[in-house]
Image (spheres, helix red, strand yellow):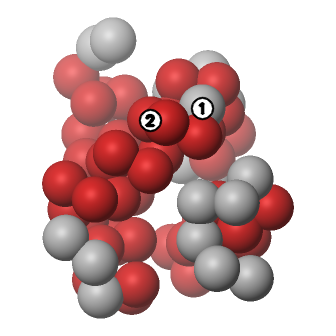
Amino acid sequence: MDKKILDFVTYCITKLSAQLKLPQRDIYSRLKKSGILYGYIVPSYDVLHTFSSRYLMDDLISYMKEKGFLPA
């Protein structure tokens, strides 16, 4: 994983942590266990990094709920 993708992943985790009021470690764990981190965020970086922060957070939260890693 190159630095720009790593920076983006870190950004996503930090923003999700603040919005969901959960520790960053917990967010990372949920994204990894759900497959969202390496199955969606990393391979879709080229598209996802163009989204607004609000849209990106809404998208990731919705996907985490869909996968059962956040309460609906």
In the image, what residue occupies the spot 59% across and 40% down?
Answer: 34
In the image, what residue occupies the spot 80% across and 61% down?
Answer: 66
Question: In the image, is residue 12 above or below residue 14?
Answer: above
Q: Position of residue 21 (x, y in %)?
A: 29, 87
User: Which label sits on residue 66?
Assistant: none
Q: Secondary structure at mark 2?
A: helix
Residue 11 appears in the figure: no
Q: Secondary structure at mark 1?
A: loop
Query: Which quarter shows the N terminus?
Result: top left
The answer to whether residue 38 is left or right of residue 58 is left
The answer to whether residue 13 is left or right of residue 47 is left
User: Which label sits on residue 35?
Assistant: 1
The answer to whether residue 71 is left or right of residue 9 is right
Q: Which residue is mark 2?
A: 32
Q: What's the amino acid at mark 2?
A: Lys
Marks 2,1: beta carbons within 8 A: yes
Q: Could you say which is closer to the camera, residue 13 or residue 55?
A: 13
Q: What's the amino acid at mark 1?
A: Gly
